[in-house]
Image (spheres, rainbow, N blue to C red):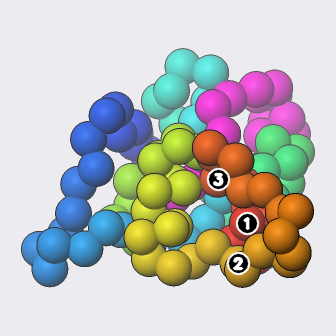
Amino acid sequence: MKIEPIKNNYPRDTNNRHPKIVSVAVLDVNQINMHSLPAPNRHHHVLRDMSAEGIISGKEGFLTDMGTFVDRKVGLIYALTNKQVKPKRDEHSYWGLELFSEDLW
C-alpha cells in the first residue's frame, strides 16, 4: 500500500477537526510502504517486524484515523489538539518537540 506522507500542511476532516493518532508507523527507506502496529506497540516493535522482511530502517511517525502517515512533529500537534497526550507525571516531565508512543500509551 502506498502512503503519501504529509509535508507541512495540517489537514482537517469535514468536521474541521484534526485527525487522531491511532497507531505507531514507520515509512520504509524509500518512503513508499508504511508499516504500522496498533497501541500499545512502540516503534521498535514495527522496526523488528520490518527487519524480518529485510528492511532495516525507515522514518518513524504515526498513522492517523484518516489513514495518513504523519511524522513525529505533526503527530505531536494532532495528539495535543485531540487531548491524546498523557498528563505529565510531574513538573519535571518534558514532552519535547516530537511525539513518542510513550506520550500516548
Residue at mark 1 to residue at mark 3: CA–CA distance: 7 Å
Q: Residue at x 87, y 75 (%)?
A: 90
Tag 1's secondary structure?
helix
Query: Disc 3 marks which amino acid?
Result: Leu
In the orientation shown, which residue stands out farthest toward the top? Answer: 30
Which residue in the structure is indicated by mark 1? Answer: 103
Q: Nearer the viewer, residue 33 or 87?
A: 87
Whether tag 1 and tag 2 are in contact, CB under 8 A, the answer is: yes
Q: Is residue 59 magenta?
A: yes
Q: Residue at x 64, y 53 (%)?
A: 99
What number is the disc on residue 86? 2
Q: Is residue 25 magenta?
A: no
Which residue in the structure is indicated by mark 3? Answer: 99
Q: Residue at x 78, y 56 (%)?
A: 94
Residue 41 in the figure: left or right of residue 4? right
Query: Disc 1 marks which amino acid?
Result: Asp
Please report whichever mark, 1 or 2, sits nearer to the chain's N-terminal start. Answer: 2
Residue 88 in the figure: left or right of residue 28? right
Q: Nearer the viewer, residue 49 or 102?
A: 102
In the orientation shown, which residue stands out farthest toward the front? Answer: 91
Residue at mark 1 to residue at mark 2: CA–CA distance: 6 Å
Query: Disc 2 marks which amino acid?
Result: Lys
Q: Residues within 10 Å of mark 2 (few under 14, many from 20)?
A: few
Quadrant assignment for the N terminus: top left
Q: Residue at x 42, y 70 (%)?
A: 81
Q: Is residue 105 above or below residue 30?
A: below
x and y, in percent, of residue 29 in the image = 62, 21
Residue at mark 3 to residue at mark 2: CA–CA distance: 11 Å
Magenta extent: 50-64
Q: Is residue 12 visible?
A: yes
